[in-house]
Amino acid sequence: MMIKTFRTFLLLGGLMTLSLFAHGKALHDAVQNNDIEAVTQLAIKENLEIRDHQQNTPLMLATQKNNAKIAEILILAGADVNAKNKIQDTPHLLSGAQGYNEILMLTLAHGANLKDTNRYGGTAIIPAAEKGHPETVKMLLAAGADPDHVNNLGWTALMEAVLLGNGSQTYLDIVTILLKGGANPNIPDNDGVTPFKYAKQKGFEDIANVIQQHGGR
């Protein structure tokens, strides 16, 4: 009798797991297919934090596709903007890194953790600076992001804008925004080299000049 009961328990458990997976897959599929009507209906009754094989939530999938409308539906339904996937990205971190500003704004308005870090130990403002998104950097600073956070490589947002940028007007704008936003121009990397020195080495004279104007050396 006990064995039969145990088998029944396992069977019911398996069916419940399959049922949850099926429901979660429906929501994931609706996001992937940009089906706004289906997402709207499913978001009311389904688990918004169900994960795929990469630990992506439906909101993370919407963020990866930069689908702001679907992201808004999910966030307003209660989706977690700080839910991490397999590679330690969150909807907030990814939207910041990629310059998906509509989604970023939604995450900032719904509990984004500005101190959360990606797999490189960086907050959202660091990859935003490195990838050339001045408006994103401005948004994050306005929200209270720390411009002097140092990632696992020993780099700040200012350092990445200089060291990994191409010296163009876009990166000059980012450097200026960071400095006006309170970034310390003299935080060196792990080798003791400052952003000013790297700008000079790379021949980015305009960037070097603006750093120097803000006390960089």
Image: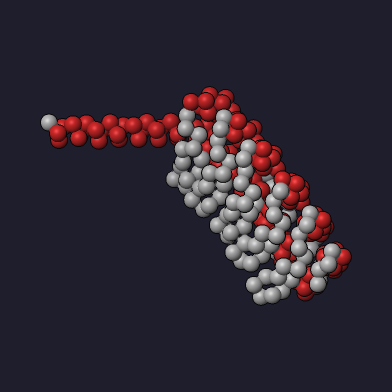
- Left or right: residue 92 versus residue 10 is right
Name the image quarter holding the N terminus: top left
- Left or right: residue 106 versus residue 35 is right
Residue at the spot 52% in from the left edge and 25% down from the top edge: 44
Name the image quarter holding the C terminus: bottom right
Residue 34 appears in the picture as rendered:
no
Q: Please identify the quarter of the rendering in which residue 70 is found.
A: top right
Q: How is the image coloured?
A: secondary structure
Residue 113 horizontal/vertical position (percent): 61, 46
Q: Residue furthest left?
A: 1
Residue 188 horizontal/vertical position (percent): 70, 70
- Left or right: residue 211 versus residue 31 is right
Residue 216 horizontal/vertical position (percent): 81, 68
Residue 166 horizontal/vertical position (percent): 76, 63
Residue at the spot 71% in from the left edge and 74% down from the top edge: 193
Vertical side of 60 occupied by 164: above or below: below
Residue at the spot 50% in from the left edge and 43% down from the top edge: 56
Q: Please state the total of marks drawn on the protein image.
A: 0
Residue 189 appears in the picture as rendered:
yes
